[in-house]
Amino acid sequence: MDFGDSVEEREQKIRNTPHCVPNMGHSMTVWDQRSELEFTKDWNGINHVTLKAPRGASTRTLAFSLLKLPSFSNIPLVYFDNASVSNPDLPLSERDDDSQHSEIIGSFFSEAIFKPAKAMRGGIPICFPQFGNCGSLEQHGFARNKTWSIDNDPPPLHPSDSHGKVSVDLLLKPSEDDLKCWPHCFEFRLRVSLAMDGDLTMISRIRNIDAKPFSFSFAYHTYLSVSDISEVRIEGLETLDYLDNLCQRERFTEQGDAITFESEVDRAYLGSPNVIAVFDHEKKQTFVIRKEGLPDVVVWNPWEKKSRTMVDFGDEEYKQMLCVDGAVIEKPITLRPGEEWTGRLELSAVPSTYCTDHLDHIGSM
Ligand SMILES: O=P(O)(O)OC[C@H]1O[C@@H](O)[C@H](O)[C@@H](O)[C@@H]1O
């Protein structure tokens, strides 16, 4: 496991980091960043990162492991507040104001397999340098199965990507084995940030440090936790063309007003707007996905029959999940030597009423 520094050294650096003072709207609060980032080892010796974003009396927490297996790829759960931790099933409408968010990302599935060299299902695995099986590499590329290290000295990002957020920077470089199957030198920097309102931001920067160009496809394979898939509707993808993975990637045009679910779906929507909304009617909650540099959107639910064939997935768990991935699929990114690509995804969970009032222009953005 390569953390760059030891956990102790890393913690010392964080202790030396100046406090940041985020703008909280009406009030300014000194946000003591020292307590907001934790590195721990679990009983398996696996290193974990926990980001904590305090807001009033509650704390939003994001924990994930830098496992060798699912590498960064598992974000088990976002706890938006203490109330939602103790009462995850309480409908949003029955929570008080300060606990108007529940977890935004699917937890591990009951039959998820914790086995080296294979990503564990759930969270947000990173698909790179290949999405799906359209290439010579393993399904969804190798990045999701790798060990990521902590990046102690990341090149700066725009200040708005840091203010009011607690963040961790990760780094992936190809191993000797990776270079044998994909002979391109790259640096993949990933910033994961949690804001006080619980919004999760992921910024990927992939740089070509090779002497020749390379091309890749990419996805944030985002497992959303939903109350009941039959009660879910996606807005922002209507009228778009999509490649249907269930029909040998044949191209179709979406005809419906919004995407709803009554059977297996496995599609890549092409050239989508930068804001997509996933409405969960039963929970009265909406996931808002904002993305940049990610023109395509993958929508996947395995439904009943396929679920039964998936060894790391319960037969009924398709009802409580939906993958909606910001992705680059149709036109792979090509980087010349020295060039860098950035792909950014922001995920929020808001009460659906808020969404109707504020995001009625989804799809036109
Ligand atoms: O089981 P995996 O490798 O994590 O992939 C799950 C699914 O991921 C989706 O993104 C693909 O479109 C599906 O075709 C695939 O089945």
Image (tube, helix red, strand yellow):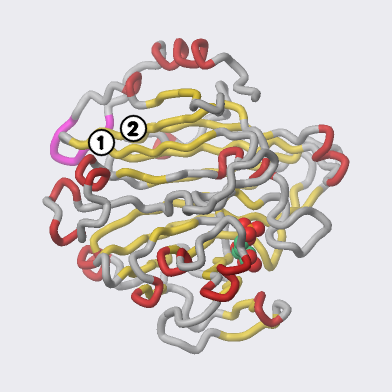
In this view of the protein, can residue 270 be seen by the observer?
no
Q: Nearer the viewer, residue 351 or 309?
A: 309
Crowd class of label 1 (few under 14; some 14 to 19; many from 20; radius 10 Å): many
Badge 1 marks a residue whose secondary structure is strand
Q: Which residues are magenta?
A: 22-28
- Labels 2 and 1 touching (C-beta < 8 A): yes
* Residue 298 lies in the magenta-colored region: no
Residue 186 placement, left or right of 44: right
Q: Nearer the viewer, residue 334 or 167?
A: 167
Query: Looking at numbered disc 1 in the image, what kind of residue is underneath it?
Result: Thr
Name which residue lies at 43% across and 17% down: 14
303 relative to 207, above or below: below
Q: Quadrant of the C terminus?
A: bottom left
**Which label sits on residue 10?**
none
Q: Percent position (x, y) of residue 177?
A: 83, 37
234 relative to 218, above or below: below
Q: Quadrant of residue 50?
A: top left
**Which label sits on residue 59?**
1
Query: Looking at numbered disc 2 in the image, what kind of residue is underneath it?
Result: Lys
Q: Percent position (x, y) of residue 65?
A: 52, 35
Badge 2 marks a residue whose secondary structure is strand
Q: Nearer the viewer, residue 163 or 348?
A: 348
Residue on which the image places disc 2: 52
Quarter of the render that holds ligand 1: bottom right
Name which residue lies at 80% across and 60% down: 135
Residue 103 placement, left or right of 181: left
Q: Percent position (x, y) of residue 216?
A: 73, 54
